[in-house]
């Protein structure tokens, strides 16, 4: 009992215990957590209208908002949420209880607009400029006048109940972040076409983050990295997304230009002050709709944008001298407005004769999508529209990007690997303890080794939770390496102590020999790991970082504590 008391009053052991307590607080284990956490909130959804916000990608897992019940029905799994959502009726109001409060959501109808084979004459309001005399001064003022137009009749049909707009996943049980290898998602490695400055790199990262957020993707990590030769890369990790959703969005520069001839009138980004994304001013073009073509169906989309005054004036100056032509009983300018995306022509729009020489800020952008069926063409058109809207809002990237590597990981494989890793880890610890006991035949040696090895793993997990490091396959490999190195060092300490007993040398000399070997191995490991922080475009960074942190914890915290415990228990 006296020796046990001496162990827990030793300064090195006290430091280890304090570090372990801090690690547990950082991890914040909560194995009994129920419910599902909110990963993201979709744009223009019922959830967003109700006030539910997407969590920040940098927020800790345990701080995520968790759904507890819907209309007093407990939600314990993603399957429960899907079943309740699928059972909703149109315009049904539900109350969602979360860890942050209550929200009332109304289930909206999922509609589709179809074009009929009938035409109708409609009256639309058009803004024109007229000259009026006011107090003897001739002024140009805007007036709204009604005009008539012929278009195909459309009908809106209800196809079902729209989703509530929440992306969810099982509620986390600790602050340990799971990387894509464990939770599933997409990882993309991109390389700039040319080297860029640090300022342009920061602009590039901010633009990419904005694109992904505008496009409706959440839980996004975008960071820069380099390889051993200094080449620049960008690593993008998106939890819960698939490759098709992000590949084109990230790879293309996204340079949008509206030209007449060789003259650029406006570009995406600063020249655009507003892009409509609501249903009343964006969607399938009601005037054109969907048409049968030779290889399937073609659907056209249309949405309105607002130009900056400078861009509107450029348009007025360029169109002032363009001749007017008559086409299908309508008057247009002789030249068209060509829309280019990444220097490829995506559409050409006729310019109404009434817009000649006028600085109009409100215009409409259109495009198309195709597919073998009407539904497929509609989806393709709306996807193209969403991407074009995103680029108009965010502007072009400062440089072209090349996709070097794309990984899509299944969450099912990740969960299975995590369970197997925990099981194998526990078995490895017990096996090492048994082998050490068989070798030395002393519980005072084998038990402290087991406790120290578990402590090192806990300290590494605590630091990962504290700094928000993702636990992926590379990080787990680093934990295994660090724990294995720790066992080697502890056996070195025991061997030196046992050899010292036989040689009748003092304890200080024994520990000096042991820690000389330990520090030599430590510095060799750190030197070997530093290049891996930058190798493979940074994909091995987790392995190198965790290994360095793990062996550092061991050398400066756990090994000294282990040596003190062994000295107290074995010293006669």
Image: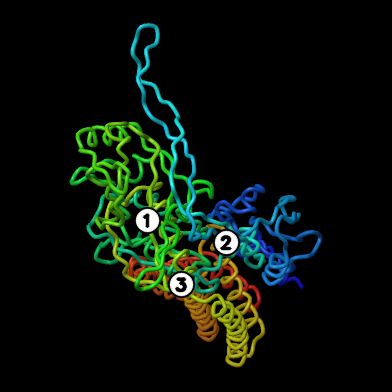
Foreground: disc 1 or disc 3? 3
Position of 56 relative to 133 (above/below): below
Q: Residue 569 is drawn in which quadrant? A: bottom right
Instruction: Give the residue number, with chain letter if any, for mark 2.
Output: 465
Q: Secondary structure at mark 3?
A: loop
* Cβ atoms under marks 2 and 3 closer than 8 Å: no
Identify the residue shown where x is 48% and y is 71%: 475
The vertical placement of 44 against 227, above or below, is: above
568 relative to 369, above or below? below
Image height check: is 529 above or below 114?
Answer: below
**Count of residue discs:** 3
Residue drawn at (32%, 31%) of the image: 359
Residue 445 lies left or right of residue 205; in this view the side is: right
Q: Quadrant of residue 260?
A: top left
In the rendering, which numbered label is found on residue 367? 1
Quadrant including the N terminus: bottom right
Q: CA distance from mark 2 to mark 1?
A: 46 Å
Label 1 vs 3, first from the N-terminus: 1
* Label drawn at residue 441: none
**SS of the residue under disc 1:** strand
- The one nearer the camera, 49 or 17, is 49
Mark 3 lies on residue: 373
Location of the C terminus (image quadrant):
bottom right
| Residue furthest top in the image | 136
- Residue situated in front as seen by the camera: 102 or 154: 154
As drawn, the residue found furthest toward the bottom would be 438
Q: Residue at x 34, y 31 (%)?
A: 309
**Could you tell me how far apart the alpha carbons at marks 1 and 3 are, in whole angstroms?**
18 Å
Residue 307 placed where, x, y %? 37, 37
Q: Name the N-terminal-most of marks 2 and 3.
A: 3
């Amino acid at each position: 009992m006296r020796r046990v008391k001496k162990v827990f009053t030793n300064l090195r052991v006290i430091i280890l215990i304090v570090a372990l307590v801090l690690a547990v607080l950082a991890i914040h284990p909560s194995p009994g957590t129920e419910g599902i956490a909110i990963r993201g909130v979709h744009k223009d959804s019922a959830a967003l209208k109700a006030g539910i916000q997407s969590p920040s990608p940098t927020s800790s897992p345990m701080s995520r908002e968790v759904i507890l019940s819907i209309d007093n029905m407990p939600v314990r799994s993603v399957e429960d949420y899907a079943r309740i959502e699928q059972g909703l009726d149109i315009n049904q109001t539900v109350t969602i209880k979360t860890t942050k409060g209550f929200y009332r959501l109304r289930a909206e109808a999922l509609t589709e607009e179809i074009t009929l084979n009938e035409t109708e004459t409609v009256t639309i309001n058009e803004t024109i400029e007229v000259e009026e005399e006011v107090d003897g001064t001739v002024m140009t003022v805007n007036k709204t006048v009604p005009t008539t137009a012929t278009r195909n009749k459309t009908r809106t049909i209800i196809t079902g109940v729209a989703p509530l707009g929440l992306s969810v996943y099982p509620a986390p049980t600790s602050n340990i972040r799971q990387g894509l290898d464990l939770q599933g998602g997409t990882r993309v490695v991109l390389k700039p076409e040319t080297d860029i400055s640090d300022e342009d790199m920061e602009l590039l990262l901010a633009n990419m983050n904005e694109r992904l957020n505008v496009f409706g993707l959440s839980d996004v990590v975008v960071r820069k990295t380099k390889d051993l030769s200094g080449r620049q890369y960008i690593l993008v990790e998106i939890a819960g997304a698939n490759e098709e959703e992000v590949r084109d969005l990230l790879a293309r520069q996204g340079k949008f230009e509206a030209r007449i001839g060789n003259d650029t009138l406006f570009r995406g980004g600063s020249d655009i002050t507003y892009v409509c994304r609501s249903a009343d001013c964006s969607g399938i073009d009601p005037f054109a709709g969907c048409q049968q073509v030779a290889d399937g169906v073609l659907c056209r989309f249309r949405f309105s944008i607002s130009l900056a005054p400078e861009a509107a004036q450029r348009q007025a100056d360029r169109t002032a001298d363009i001749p007017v032509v008559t086409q299908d009983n309508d008057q247009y300018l002789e030249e068209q407005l060509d829309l280019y995306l990444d220097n490829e022509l995506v559409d050409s729009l006729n310019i109404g004769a009434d817009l000649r020489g006028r600085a109009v800020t409100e215009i409409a952008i259109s495009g198309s999508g195709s597919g073998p069926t009407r539904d497929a063409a509609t989806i393709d058109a709306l996807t193209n529209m969403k991407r074009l809207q995103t680029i108009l809002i965010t502007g072009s990237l400062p440089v072209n990007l090349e996709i070097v590597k794309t990984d899509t990981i299944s969450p099912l494989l990740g969960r299975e690997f995590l369970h197997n890793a925990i099981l194998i880890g526990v078995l490895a610890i017990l096996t090492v303890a048994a082998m050490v006991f068989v070798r030395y035949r002393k519980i005072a040696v084998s038990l402290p080794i087991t406790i120290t090895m578990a402590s090192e793993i806990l300290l590494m997990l605590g630091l990962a939770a504290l700094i928000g490091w993702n636990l992926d396959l590379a990080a787990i490999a680093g934990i295994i390496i660090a724990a294995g190195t720790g066992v080697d060092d502890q056996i070195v300490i025991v061997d030196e102590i046992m050899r010292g007993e036989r040689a009748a040398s003092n304890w200080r000399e024994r520990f000096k020999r042991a820690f000389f070997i330990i520090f030599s191995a430590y510095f060799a490991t750190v030197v070997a790991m530093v290049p891996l922080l930058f190798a493979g475009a940074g994909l091995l960074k987790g392995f190198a970082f965790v290994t360095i942190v793990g062996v550092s914890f061991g050398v400066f915290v756990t090994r000294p504590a282990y040596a003190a415990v062994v000295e107290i228990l074995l010293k006669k």
